[in-house]
Image: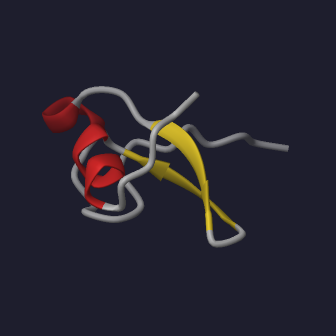
Amino acid sequence: MVIKIQTYCDRCKKSVKEIGRLTNVKWKGVNLKLCKNCRRRIKIRVR
């Protein structure tokens, strides 16, 4: 089994090299990996 490390944001599709690190966010029942800007856009605060 190969675990792939996700290297881009689920929303804006920018790579980690451009935007920095991604965080796991559960939004409307779906797990997403989002960058800081996309998290702010859908107004999610990570606790």
Question: Residue 19 at x, y = what percent?
Answer: 19, 35
Q: Is residue 41 above or below residue 18?
A: below
Which residue is drawn at the image coordinates 50% and 49% (left, top)? 33
Q: Left or right? Give the position of 5 relative to 16.
A: right
Quadrant of image for the C terminus: top right
Which residue is drawn at the image coordinates 75% and 42% (left, top)? 2
Q: Left or right? Give the position of 30 relative to 25.
A: right
Residue at far right of view: 1
Question: Residue 9 at x, y = what percent?
Answer: 36, 52
Which residue is drawn at the image coordinates 41% and 61% (left, top)? 10
Which residue is drawn at the image coordinates 40% and 42% (left, top)? 7
Question: Residue 23 at x, y = what percent?
Answer: 49, 36
Asked which quadrant contains residue 11, the reply is bottom left
Residue at far bottom of view: 28
Q: Nearer the viewer, residue 38 or 16?
A: 38
Q: Nearer the viewer, residue 26 or 19?
A: 26
| Total marks in image | 0
Quadrant of image for the N terminus: top right
Residue at far left of view: 18
Question: Residue 18 at x, y = what percent?
Answer: 14, 36
Q: Left or right? Give the position of 43 relative to 47.
A: left
